[in-house]
Amino acid sequence: MENRTHTADVAAGETATVAGWVHEIRDLGGIAFLILRDRTGKLQIKFEKDEMDEDLVETGLDVHRESVVTVTGAVEEEPRAPTGLEMVPDSLDVLAGADPELPLDPSGKVDAELPTRLDNRTLDLRKPEVKAIFEIRSEILRSVREYFRSVGSTEINTPKIVATGTEGGTELFPITYFGQEAFMNQSPQLFKQLMVGSGLERVFEIGPIFRAEEHNTPRHLNEATMIDFESAFVDHHEAMDVCEGTLKAAYEGVAENCAEELELLGYDDFAVPEDDFPRLTYEEAIERVNATGELDEQLVWGDDLPTEAEKALGSDVGGHYFITDWPSEIKPFYIQDYDDDPQLSKGFDLMHPRMELVSGGQREHRYDELVAGFEQQGLDPEQFDYYTRMFRYGMPPHAGWAYGVERLVMTMLDLDNIREAVLFPRDRQRLSP
Ligand code: AMO
């Protein structure tokens, strides 16, 4: 619509055409108001019944809530209107009527449970506070992409249909690929590593991953979006520097460009993390968890951190932190071990006080060690020949990591459930919409 003006841009003294949804109709007898809502805000349309064309009044006031209309009229100042402006309509067209019974109330006056909201995401996203989450998600991805550019990283896209898994064989979704068994990819891991040995050297990808995990929790999805980074000629500490920079860039972007959205969500104290994130070794982390006394059973070296341990440590540290130098046994085959202590790996996690956000590490780039690592994890290196072969032709030392985007949004905005951070979640119960 060429001549459309958004409600936020209308000015007193002008004639304008606005388009949007009927948010509410308030009929006070001789006078009635239609509140029109578009993506920028709302505008009051005034109907003075005795002074206006009967048909216009009828069309304007008989239309059901959430119908799509365009209205043309003169904009006037009106201090009693919510925005200080109102429109006196000359014409009104109904572009798409809405049923009188709505499955959920976009004005938010009637609360809806999460499953109802997810079943009717289109209507749910008419609520400004829900839309705000996705405006913020979009800003996170924008600022992260800008940050990656500033550190000389090239955006790539890798296949989502693959022949083998990477993150442990049990969590793959099988599909049929022209009569052959294939899988939905769990991670761009092997492809991004192959790219650091290419002329690109330093790459990132923002894309979907698929995991057939049985968990049904507030922080797991079966399809998630990951921000992956991988760079040649860096070690795990340098990779952690970029990881920390990415998170700070995302928070800064949101603080700078999403003031309205943050206000809608009730954040008057949105803080960009400024201090360096502490880097605790795994050993220090388990000692610290044990010292909190929050766990029924003390952790011993070699244990993975259970959820309660992550929570206890998170509230003890009080901000983002890394856990480095994990036991080799609980990290994947592609993570490099310390030469002087092969029990210890150069893997790391970035933690938010509530949960893990990132896994990463320095990678094993030496062919013989890589193949031995496959065998130790019970994987057949033959199946990964397309990957291991490239390590025979000059694969530089490299490191990288991956964020879960939904967990980043969820922790940034303190959302209770990861499903609120994704438009159409895929979980054990949900395959549609
Ligand atoms: P990992 O498996 O730890 O590492 O995944 C990285 C990050 O992705 C997010 N994530 C998930 N989010 C929601 N639902 C899920 N089911 C889910 N699974 C993972 C988490 C997690 O920290 N290849 C390595 C990364 C690397 O080493 O570069 C990997 O995939 O936030």
Image (cartoon, rainbow, N blue to C red):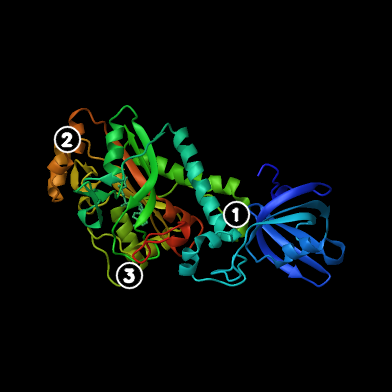
Q: Amino acid at mark 1?
A: Glu
Query: What residue is shown at x 76% (from left), y 59% (from top)?
Result: 45
Structural distance between the alpha carbons of marks 3 and 2: 41 Å
Q: Amino acid at mark 3?
A: Leu
In the picture, the disc for residue 367 is 2
In the picture, the disc for residue 295 is 3
Asked which secondary structure carries label 1, the reply is helix
**In this rendering, would 267 be left or right of 364?**
right
* Quadrant of the drawing holding the N terminus: top right
Query: What residue is shown at x 23% (from left), y 59% (from top)?
Result: 301
User: 347 or 158: nearer the eye?
Assistant: 158
Cβ atoms under marks 1 and 3 closer than 8 Å: no
x and y, in percent, of residue 89 in the image: 79, 56
x and y, in percent, of residue 433 in the image: 43, 60
**Quick one: which residue is furthest to the right in this view?**
51
User: 343 or 179: nearer the eye?
Assistant: 179
Estimate how packed mark 2 is, as few (under 14), some (14 to 19) or many (20 or more) residues with alpha carbons within 10 Å.
some
User: 317 or 180: nearer the eye?
Assistant: 180
x and y, in percent, of residue 285 in the image: 33, 57
Estimate how packed mark 3 is, as few (under 14), some (14 to 19) or many (20 or more) residues with alpha carbons within 10 Å.
some
Tag in front: 1 or 3: 1
Asked which secondary structure carries label 2, the reply is helix
Structural distance between the alpha carbons of marks 1 and 3: 38 Å
Q: Which residue is mark 1?
A: 261
x and y, in percent, of residue 72 in the image: 75, 51
Can the viewer see residue 108? yes
**In this rendering, would 24 be left or right of 140?**
right
Tag in front: 1 or 2: 1
